[in-house]
Image (cartoon, rainbow, N blue to C red):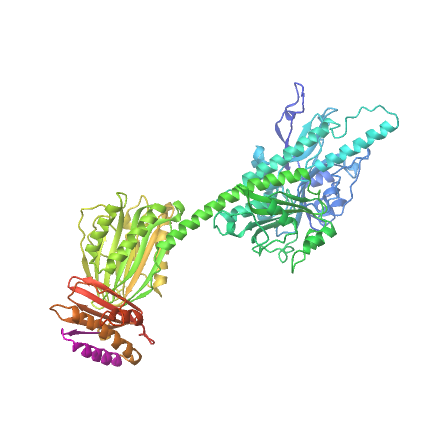
Amino acid sequence: MEYGTSRCDDGPGEPPGVPEQRRGVHGRMPLAVVVIDAGGLVTHWSSGARKLFGATREQAVGRPAVDLMPVSGALRGARVRTDATGHPELDDTQLGTVYYPTAGRARMADPAHGRADVLWWAYPLVGPGPERLLVLAADAEGAGGDALGRDERIAPAFALHTEFPGAERLAGRLPDILPNMGPATAGRIVAHVLELGYPVLEISRCERIPVTPDWGVPRYRERLARQEAVRRAAAADGAPDHAPAPGLPLHPGDVDLEHAAVRERLEFLNEVSGRIGTSLDLARTIREVTSAAVPRFADFAGTHLRAQVLAGEGFPEGPPDVTTVWHRVWVEHTDEPGRWDDTVPVGESIAFPEHTPFFQCMVTGEPVLIERISDEAGDRIAGQFEKRDLRPLINGRSLLIVPLKARDVVLGFMVLLRRPGREPFDGMDRTTGAELAARAGLVLDNARMYTYQENVAETLQDSMLPQVTPRMAGCDTATRYLPGTRLGRVGGDWFDTIKLPGSRTALVVGDVMGHGLTSAAMMGQLRTAVQTMAALGLPPAQLLRHLDDLAQRLGEHYLATCLYAVYDPVCSELLISNAGHVPPVLVRARDGRSELLDLPTGAPIGVGGVPFETVTVRVAPGDRLVLCTDGLVEVRGQDIGAGLAALCESAAHPAASMDDACDTIIRALAAASRKDGRGGRKDDVALLMARLNGIPAEDVAQWRLALDPREVGRARRLVRERLLRWGLPEAVETAELLVSEAVTNAIRHAHTHRVRLRLVRADALLCEVTDDDHELPVLLDADRDDESGRGLRVISELAREWGTSRSGRGKAVWFEQALSHPKERR
């Protein structure tokens, strides 16, 4: 036996002793279940349908439904029958195809079946299958109709599952009573029933007319008009005029109908409020807002937003005009697939013409209602748009355009349309649509503000993170930064690669304690300080000492960990100092073995009073150094040793490239973090990997020069010979001039020790001249009569990059010269 759920509502003034089923309790009743395809033919016929309508499943499947059931008003192409009193058995609108749920009562076409009165509910079905209409039916007498009093009525209706405790019961039973269906089809149909409303019965002491998404109000007004016409006709015949004044309800049922219409609208708005704003994701919110209106309130809904709102660029300034660009961000409709796609595609950017109802809505901020778009009006609207014909889509339809506003500024608008066969929008619909838009506008503004704040935070984070050069002298690098899942995805993790004199590279990774914008701002300050001090050539331990002092001066809350390493590709060694950071991993090229470098931990930056040490690590060409922040290896409640072991294991995994190696580490550590229900990574992650290629001895040349002006000529000759030996004749002339200027400056300012000149062939030609003078040269703007001061000006103009730095033994002037045929990398 198939069962549905019914509800009995006490009528006004219900006397004591009413049977239990009539005092608001929930009961069960046998249901007939029929599924109909787009052609009006029966595709599924339950045993309950056989008992109610008389036909067997074999007799019913494949036949027109209108020949088997008296629910003609819900079926395609059927006419409306009337009972003996001349009243319509069903909804008095020619529906054609049903696009929204409806319900009614019907007399049996063949009373010989023993059932005189049938209650029915019809649900439209959408989706990939052939099923297009679900009809539930029941015997009115079995529902308690034979026990009703003379003045009482029973009517089928729909109720939201949120107010109906029996919801779960039907959800569990309906798949069992859908005949001969697989779980996918049954699940799809159940989902439609649960979304569109529960079948219920309403019993009252006054007449009730079923309320459907047509809202019932237009019929209420028509009924008033008919009764007013009867009253006037009776008055003309001399009958006493006892009818109420025009415009007032003429029957308790009419008042009840108006209340039902208002309740239906409130239920709709309440349901919409529960469906929209489930997240702060702007795209998802837009889809929720648009889908909420279809099919219950409209047959088409399209949402347009201002460009700056969609881009998360902040609150729009000023009212929109003809130059305002709008994006069509989502469309929902009940038409056949693809009908709207070519003319009004999702994602289109458009500025709406002035003489259109869309422009009127967006500039006034008020809803625009066109009860029925005539052919003339449709032609006029479509004529404002170039290269598109809107007439087949809008002519004959009812149009309602509602603005989406926040703080009295129009953020967008929603276009709503109803088919010609449906009740057109009226004044009450205009109010309902405006309320829907008001709620949607607030939700959209919240999502917009969240998107804007997220964009600001990510822009700040991106601006502070370096654009790391993938190739430095003697080493290749690859990086990854993964924002955490907390506090706007902004944190204090950073990495950096810094070019140093002598073809060296500084590798830095750090982590400011905490999260959010404050940590990101601290990170920016500390990173800038590290870059400045690294350019001065400070040894690693001394650099961290100065950084610690700076953090204490900036404030007591400046705490960070930092790992600073200097790679010398000529000497093949690393100088590393650690300030409370996760130790690095070194992967040896000769055997692929990985090891966690044993370094003095040190205290975090900002603690103060703790010494730092520098450790020298010998490396070989091809070794890889992996530096990361603790967000990659640390999971709350777990030993960090397990994460470090997983890092060593994943770092040693062979990879085709540096980028692939980084991705391998990220995937392996992410999988380890999710294992055993640990919930995955929450903290930021910074990862820096460097392949230490080294620079071969044959690509390095260095000489010592005496403090004699004649050594300038010797320096030019040595450079020329070496460049020709390296096969770089095109670089000789510029290199001779630059070396001459740098050596001349060094010999002039050196004191006792000799000047050293070094050339390095890499992707570019690197030249470094050092002496024992600690005074850094300054770029001057020399006059025409000055005999000196032009050396650095010449270097600045001809070199690709250049700089100066101090060392413990003096100063260095270096420059980098581009090569037309750079050295191939091994």
- Give coordinates of residue 429: x percent, y percent: 66, 39
Question: Which residue in the rendered view is the most extreme toward the top?
Answer: 16
Q: Is residue 810 above or below residue 140?
A: below
Residue 87 in the figure: left or right of residue 5: right
Q: Quadrant of residue 223?
A: top right
Q: Is residue 545 above or below residue 297?
A: below
Q: Quadrant of residue 228?
A: top right
Considering depth in this image, is 453 or 144 the residue closer to the camera?
453
> Across the whole image, how many numbered discs are drawn on residues?
0
- The answer to whether residue 145 of the structure is visible from this angle is no
Q: Is residue 398 above or below residue 576?
A: above
Q: What residue appears at the point 21 percent right and 55 percent down from the top-left corner? A: 543
Considering depth in this image, is 713 or 77 the residue closer to the camera?
713
Q: Quadrant of the N terminus?
A: top right
- Give coordinates of residue 586: x percent, y percent: 25, 60
Residue 242 in the figure: left or right of residue 781: right
Question: Which residue in the rendered view is the most extreme toward the front?
Answer: 785
Is-magenta flag for residue 177? Answer: no
- The answer to whether residue 625 of the structure is visible from this angle is yes
Considering depth in this image, is 338 or 463 the residue closer to the camera?
463
Considering depth in this image, is 607 or 806 the residue closer to the camera?
806
* Magenta stretch, main secondary structure class: helix
Question: Which residue in the rendered view is the most extreme toward the left?
Answer: 752
Q: Is residue 102 above or below residue 612?
A: above
Q: What residue appears at the point 68 percent right and 28 percent down from the top-left corner? A: 203
Q: Quadrant of the C terminus?
A: bottom left
> What residue range appears in magenta?
701-725
- Give coordinates of residue 484: x percent, y percent: 37, 49
Q: Quadrant of residue 15?
A: top right
